[in-house]
Amino acid sequence: MKILIFGATGRTGRPLVAQAAARGWTVHAAGRDAGRLLDLVGAADSSVVDLGDPAAVAAVVKLAAPDVIVSSVGGTLPDGRLVDEAGNDAISDAAARCGVRRVIQISSLACGDSRPFASERIIAAIGPVLDAKTRAEDHLRALDLDWTIIRPGGLTEGEPTGSGALYADPRVHGRITRADLADLVLRVVATPATIRLILSAVDRTTLPAEPADIREFADA
């Protein structure tokens, strides 16, 4: 498996790189900070990329020639645009242009059809980011690609618990460690049953008791 990870130097990207390398996959790490990419030497080849430049993003995709692209990007570009939208759109378009069909986009709960079930607190805190991620989801979904969108709950640090779970249900709430999220993402990569699905990702032990009819997605 050849995997290209955008946002590789971030707090979610790092465990993605480490776990993919531990599986014996060929990893290409792409990020905006050359110094932080140096920390990944030995686990992955790497490229510095300007996520605000679609041509630069496409060049990295061509160089890596991956089987799958995982996008774990976020933040703000120098011109003020949100990477959550502009960067993700550039990555999705590059995949389509370069013939890479499998794309995993890490989004967030409270995006898209999960928005009505989000707390007012999270909407007030990061509403514009959630809007940008929602538009990026819509952009990816409109492309002829084998995409999967993963919406994690509240992200925490720490060792993996092994309790991370996926749900094909927008009503889900909960938290998940970044390490457990990385494990779920990599399980999804090679699972055809997840193609063209939007999946929520939380630690099953943090899932509220209600609604009681929520069931885990069992095929990943």
Image (cartoon, rainbow, N blue to C red):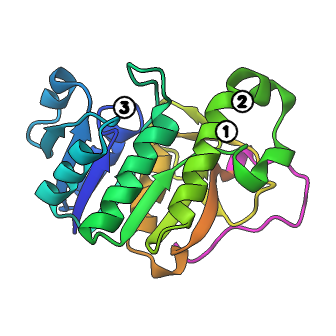
| Circle 2 or circle 3, nearest the eye | 2
**Amino acid type shown at disc 2:** Gly
Disc number for residue 10 = 3
Q: Residues within 10 Å of mark 2 (few under 14, many from 20)?
A: some
Across and down, in percent, residue 219 comes to: 56, 77
Asked if the residue at tag 1 contacts the one at tag 2, i.e. Cβ–Cβ closer than 8 Å, the answer is yes
Residue at the spot of label 1: 131
**Amino acid type shown at disc 1:** Asp
The quadrant in which residue 29 appears is top left
Specify which label sits upstream in the sequence, 3 or 1: 3
Q: Residues within 10 Å of mark 1 (few under 14, many from 20)?
A: some
Locate residue 208 relative to residue 135 in the image: left or right: right
Q: Nearer the viewer, residue 105 or 55?
A: 55
Residue 208 lies in the magenta-colored region = yes
Residue 219 lies in the magenta-colored region = yes
The Cα–Cα distance between marks 3 and 1, rounded to whole angstroms, is 21 Å
Q: Residue at x 67, y 39 (%)?
A: 131
Asked if the residue at tag 3 contacts the one at tag 2, i.e. Cβ–Cβ closer than 8 Å, the answer is no
Q: Secondary structure at mark 1?
A: helix
